[in-house]
Image (cartoon, helix red, strand yellow):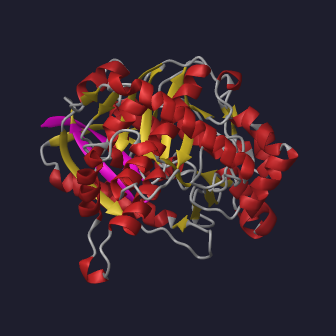
Amino acid sequence: MHDAILGIDIGTASTKAILFDLSGAEVVTASRPYPLLTPQPGWVEQDPDAVWQALIEALHDIIGQAGGYRILALALAAQAGSIIPARLNGDPAYPMITWLDSRSESLVRAWEKDGTAEGIRRLSGWRPYPGLPLPTIAWLRQHRPDVHAASQRYLGAADFLIHRLTGRFATDLSAAAEMLLVDVNTGQWSEKLCALAGVDPAMQSGLGWAGRVVGETTPEVAGLTGLPAGVPVVAGGHDQCCACLAMGMTGPGKVMLVTGTAWVITGIVETPSLADIPQRMDLNPHVVTRRWTVSQLLGGFGATVDWWLQQAWQPPGPEHALDKKSLYAHLDNALPSSPPGSHGLLFLPLSGPAQVSDAQPGGGRPGGGFIGLALAHTRADMSRAILEGCAFEVRWALDTLRAAGMPVTELWIAGGATRSPVWPQILADVSGVPIVLADYANWAALGAAILAGWGGGVYSTLEVGIALFQPPVRRLAPDASLATLYADRFAAYQRVARALAVAL
């Protein structure tokens, strides 16, 4: 019998369970999808029981494939920012309202105007974006008082599933903080924030740092999955924080850039001081004890590139349509024909510049577009300008971190941009920061497994687990010969972004 640990990624679209041996190698994987529900425009929900069923089925598959392995512990890396209004016993009273939901947009705008939003950030570390739990619950209180009255508890995906697995209501600080109901300084449910939403803090799940054992799998779960009863369930955390852990981000220096449909940049600090972090960034407890993450949504850069590929690279006629992989291959093959700097062409991503004064949550960004476009510019120039525009936004965010006194030694990249043979080098050259890439897709589950191993007593420290579970990486150094060129182009980008913000 071989020993193993289980890391589980509860994502927005699917659940993936991965069994690792104690050396960090993947043994078996299983995943199950679930749909997003859009009952009205701007509403994005999920069925909590469908998410639970996906976990049960994934665990059942793991056990079916993992003959000869004994599971020592498991932990969840879960989507944060979604909320389940629940009855006292934990059963859902309403569908899970996801972080993609925008029904609370007008409420958030009102909070921004009257100063409530800034007060929320001072207490929680987060600005209240539409879709996050605090404004969502406040919206329910105003517009669905019946649902609000029936909901004694408000559960994130993590504590909802932990309760189903163990019978206990518990979560970790990294996952709970994005509910905007936790005081980032004390690590406790905030009376003031809970009062703003009409939530009873005494009915919320027990809080603590990630890596502690919060319960054991029940006999009922054993019957549904084949997983033995009594397996320790360790508090995992926010999926982004778990990914940071897997990349070895336990202290300041390394920065993570997630490049999906939306791009998010994350760094690490050692104190929860809002005064010491950039104004546009959010502060959240890490899954590493006594560490915090600072992060910012930079924009929908992946969506911008997908839009460009469909508009400029897709052949006419549905019978000739190319899949996304082929479209990206054409883009990558064309880029070398355009030099760094894109022959003077600039592009602002369609979601708008993230660092200008008008780029506030809840609206106000001026949008994007090409600047300086001429007849001489080619499709390759336009394509390179788009990628460089996204890279200028990353450089701007990194400069903002440095200006706040945070070191930036490496930029670890996860997500779609890692698959391009060109884009990561553009990011390195524009930012001037060494890039670290790993051909690996399961960072969140990997981080959860490290926490399970540490919390379950398999590894003496997190660092031991990180060292064992590190996938092979490759590193890209900035091209020093391009430093002056890109400094000039970045300055031009900033001037255009600021001028556009003022004009619109």
In the rendered picture of this protein, how many numbered marks are placed on residues? 0
Relative to 93, residue 41 above or below: below
Tell me which residue sits at (41%, 56%) in the image.
Answer: 305
Q: Position of residue 357 (x, y in %)?
A: 71, 41
Viewer-side residue, 354 vs 440: 354
Magenta: main secondary structure equals strand
Viewer-side residue, 281 vs 291: 281
Q: Position of residue 379 (x, y in %)?
A: 36, 58
Tell me where the magenta segment starts and ends, as one range.
1-20
**In the drawing, does residue 349 fall left or right of residue 334?**
right
Residue 3 inside the magenta-drawn segment: yes
Tell me which residue sits at (41%, 25%) in the image.
Answer: 483
- Quarter assignment of residue 259: top left
Q: Is residue 7 visible?
A: no
**In the drawing, does residue 122 fall left or right of residue 92?**
right
Relative to 451, residue 269 above or below: above
Instruction: Identify the image quadrant of the C terminus.
Output: bottom right
Relative to 45, residue 462 above or below: above
Tell me which residue sits at (62%, 67%) in the image.
Answer: 94
Q: Is residue 257 visible?
A: yes
